[in-house]
Image (tube, helix red, strand yellow):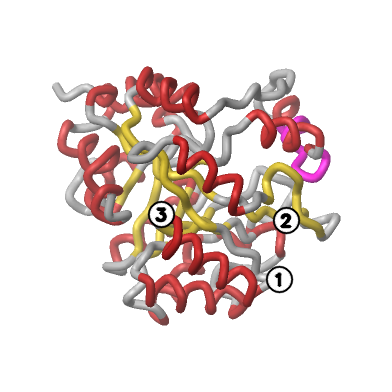
């Protein structure tokens, strides 16, 4: 058996982890309601994450079996208050700093704000051309916009011309934001309009995992990732499809900022998946798609 911890996983979906960012996210949590979610959904008292320096984070990556991490420039917006969410709406320079501190181990993913289209597109271009960011991650819910809204099309055009993928959260939203706009079928229009652009539906698409599977199966340029959910929580249909040739080459893994639990997730994969599946979803697919 090939142990998942020994593969050298690519964490293709993670948020900024610095102590400064964690402090800001904790202090502005009323806009996200993570504290409320911890108590009502996960039945535990919320605690502020300590955050890590780049050196500490790389040491933790080594401990759990992660070779490379992709850190996104978050651009999350409060649906109710109509403003950026502190700690979750990052400056490009914050991510550039950690990328530069860990060359070859940490890479960047640009962000996008559909309310400042020209400024955001220019920042995406700079991220990729100047700092070698590997793609873009978008979180559309707080803006009240579906990913196929025309306000996102300048981003897709830019990324298609630059040859980098765009990943996006799909499925319901645990945050205090509407979830219906995240149905994976919204990727259908984007994939048809931009066949040159690789798209990644994040967070398994649950509770519409079948829709995400259908999109990845239908379109050569649509992929999916398994971030946010531990393997034992994956939809049975999702497990069947990624553990077969149907979606094995179209799936990747990300920690979604839960890197401390990555080792546990890898152990669960050892119980559930074939060796060739683990190699593909933990490393090979991300290495190819993000040109690492």
Label whose residue precedes the other's in the sequence (1 or 3): 1
User: Is residue 181 shown left or right of residue 279?
Assistant: right
Label whose residue precedes the other's in the sequence (2 or 3): 2
| Residue 143 image offset from top left, x and y in percent | 71, 63
Q: Nearer the viewer, mark 2 or mark 3?
A: 2
Q: Quadrant of residue 233?
A: top left
Q: Which residue is mark 3?
A: 210
Residue at the image position 43 percent from the left and 44 percent from the top: 70
Instruction: Tell me the SS state at disc 1.
Output: loop
User: Is residue 51 shown left or right of residue 108?
Assistant: right
Residue at the image position 28 percent from the left and 28 percent from the top: 272
Q: Which residue is mark 2?
A: 77
Would residue 54 be counted in the magenta stretch?
no
> Where 181 falls versus 103 (above or below)?
below
- Secondary structure of the magenta portion, mostly? helix
Label 2 – label 3 distance at C-alpha: 28 Å
> Where 213 falls versus 277 (above or below)?
below
- Are the two marked residues, 1 and 2, in contact with CB atoms closer than 8 angstroms? yes
Q: Magenta stretch: give its range.
A: 30-37
Q: Which residue is mark 1?
A: 115
């Amino acid at each position: 058996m090939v142990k998942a911890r020994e593969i050298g996983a690519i964490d293709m979906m993670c948020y900024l982890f610095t102590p400064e960012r964690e402090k800001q996210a904790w202090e502005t949590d009323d806009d996200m309601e993570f504290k409320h979610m911890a108590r009502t959904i996960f039945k535990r008292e919320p605690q502020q994450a300590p955050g890590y320096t780049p050196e500490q984070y790389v040491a933790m990556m080594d401990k759990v079996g992660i070779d490379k991490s992709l850190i996104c420039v978050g651009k999350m917006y409060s649906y109710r208050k109509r403003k950026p969410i502190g700690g979750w709406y990052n400056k490009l320079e914050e991510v550039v700093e950690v990328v530069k501190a860990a060359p070859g181990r940490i890479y960047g993913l640009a962000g996008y704000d559909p309310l400042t289209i020209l400024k955001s597109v220019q920042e995406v271009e700079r991220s990729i051309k100047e700092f070698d960011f590997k793609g873009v991650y978008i979180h559309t819910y707080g803006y009240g916009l579906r990913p196929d809204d025309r306000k996102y099309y300048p981003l897709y055009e830019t990324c298609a011309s630059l040859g980098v993928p765009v990943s996006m959260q799909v499925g319901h939203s645990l945050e205090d934001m509407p979830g219906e706009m995240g149905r994976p079928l919204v990727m259908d229009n984007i994939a048809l309009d931009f066949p040159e652009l690789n798209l990644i539906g994040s967070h398994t698409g649950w509770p519409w995992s079948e829709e995400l599977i259908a999109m990845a199966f239908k379109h050569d340029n649509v992929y999916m990732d398994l971030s946010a959910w531990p393997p034992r929580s994956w939809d049975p249909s999702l497990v069947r499809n990624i553990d077969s040739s149907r979606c094995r080459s179209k799936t990747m893994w990300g920690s979604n900022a839960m890197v401390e639990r990555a080792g546990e997730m890898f152990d669960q994969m050892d119980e559930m998946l074939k060796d060739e599946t683990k190699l593909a979803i933990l490393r090979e697919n991300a290495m190819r798609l993000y040109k690492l």
